[in-house]
Amino acid sequence: MTWNAVDIALMLGKIVALYAIILTFAAYLVLAERRILAWMQDRIGPNRVGPFGLMQPLADVIKMLTKEDMIPKAADRLLFSLAPAMAAIPAILTFSVVPLGAPLHLFGREVALQITDLDVGVLFFLALSAIAVYGIALGGWASNSKYALLGSIRGLSQLISYELSMGLSLVPVVMLSKSFRLSDIVNAQADMPFIVYQPLAFVIFLVSIFAECRRIPFDLPEAEGELVAGFHSEYSGMRFGLFFVGEYINIIALSALASLFFLGGWRGPLLPPIVWFFLKVFVIAFLFIWVRGTLPRLRYDQLMHLGWKFLTPLALLNILATGWWLALR
Amino acid sequence: MSILSDIKETVTGIGGILTGLSITLRHIFRKPATVQFPEEKRPMPERFRGSIVLTRDPDGAERCVACYLCSGACPVDCISMAAAEAENGRRYAAWFRINFARCILCGLCAEACPTLAIQMAPEMIPSKRQVIDWVYEKEDLLIDGTGKDPNYNFYRHAGIGVVSPRGGNPGEQPPVDVRTLLP
């Protein structure tokens, strides 16, 4: 395939636009979370900066950037400064395989609304979510603090355990669509979203992405009641900001993937495809916030029990049942 | 543990989670309990000790006679003043100062005051950016009203020969010439 100037410009444009979309979305997801959590607790939430508090993300960024950036004396300086990026980059990279909408016709060529349509998109996503573990592990290790280390150890074992059930819950999706390519998975749901055939896999995937995002009820790596702030206890300023924004980008990325795998991605009647896509992402992101406002944190053994003794066997059974169904159909 | 009881436990567990989710969802649409403080103030009870004011007597004159009792009663020494005397012998405070950065709003000054001049008020003092802004002078403290006892006027009951001649106040008797009591 040869590339000419228009192709390169289109690709750069897509990358820049995607960055802008994700970062804005992540910033406003923080605000949305704070407002919705506040409503759930009969409070109002941040409403001082701008109309309805809409400028709050900007104020937060200014606050983060102007805070003192501290590195503990005993910390491993290189890894300490590397870890936040390692937490945020895989989350952003995940978006490179996400199709945001139906292909457009621009400048006489078909432009897919995704950066790259990898033929192993699902595996790419699983690999990236495995790499995201490094951010937590190194962040906790390099801080040279017992709380951070405890948090990162918890995070490591939790993420590794739940990656298993997350990967296994995606196997039926791949079996149904017969492809690892995300655009093929979306196209396979043209008639019916996979949630209809795979409600169990959807629930397992949902629980696993909650754990992957380290969100309540699985926020043990940062359990603020016990571990100060877990693996990012020692971080301040924009380094903490990167961890923080990485977590929210991760939520958006995983919501996007959940909508791709089970809710039919950008497919839907009446509304334009990209609107459908973001609507589905919003719904799942709201679910994240809703669950955070409702459930208490699990105990550590309960977490491991749920992951290994419940979700993983259930996902395996589900694969078995799906295979059976596909063979007998 | 049998599989059956496991399934039962799972179902009740999921039911519990759904109940919780429905409760939080309902609360989204409820009116928030928040009072947005500086704009919207909660009505305080009448006897709430939120700030200190200097009141006036029913005739509109200052009640304070600069006796220093409030200053002496104050456990944190936040009240200071200088006494002065008018031409008719009536005492007043030349300046009167309360440092609200120190004041603990205990109300001992109001209890100590013989003329009911210094009183606790329910309005709270707003926060300030500079500590010096917390220092309130007499002009800031004086209010136009009489406060808690609207009809009380110290000089109607006491105050030796200042406003009315000695013994001229209600409930008072003219002074006794001690020499007439000699045996």
Image: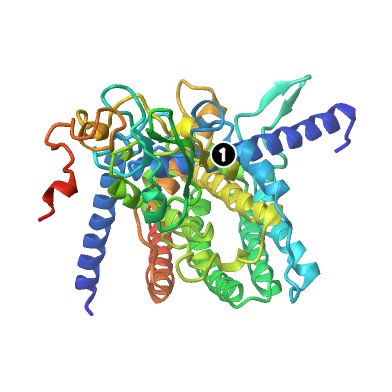
Left or right: where B56 falls relative to A154 = left
The residue tagged 1 is B133
Observer able to see residue A183 = no
The quarter of the picture where residue B29 lies is: top left
> Tag 1's secondary structure?
helix
Q: Is residue A178 above or below residue A235?
A: above
Residue in the image at 37% along x and 60% along y: A321
Closest to the observer, A50 or A128: A50
Amino acid carrying mark 1 in the image: Asp
Observer able to see residue A314 = yes
Closest to the observer, A97 or A300: A300
Residue in the image at 90% along x and 30% along y: A4
Residue in the image at 47% along x and 71% along y: A226
Closest to the observer, B9 or A108: B9
Q: Which quadrant is home to the N terminus of chain A?
A: top right
Colour mode of the rendering? rainbow
Pinpoint residue A281: horizontal percent, then vertical percent. Answer: 50, 39
Left or right: where B171 falls relative to A321 = left
Q: Residues within 10 Å of mark 1 (few under 14, many from 20)?
A: few
The numbered mark 1 sits on a residue in which chain?
A: B
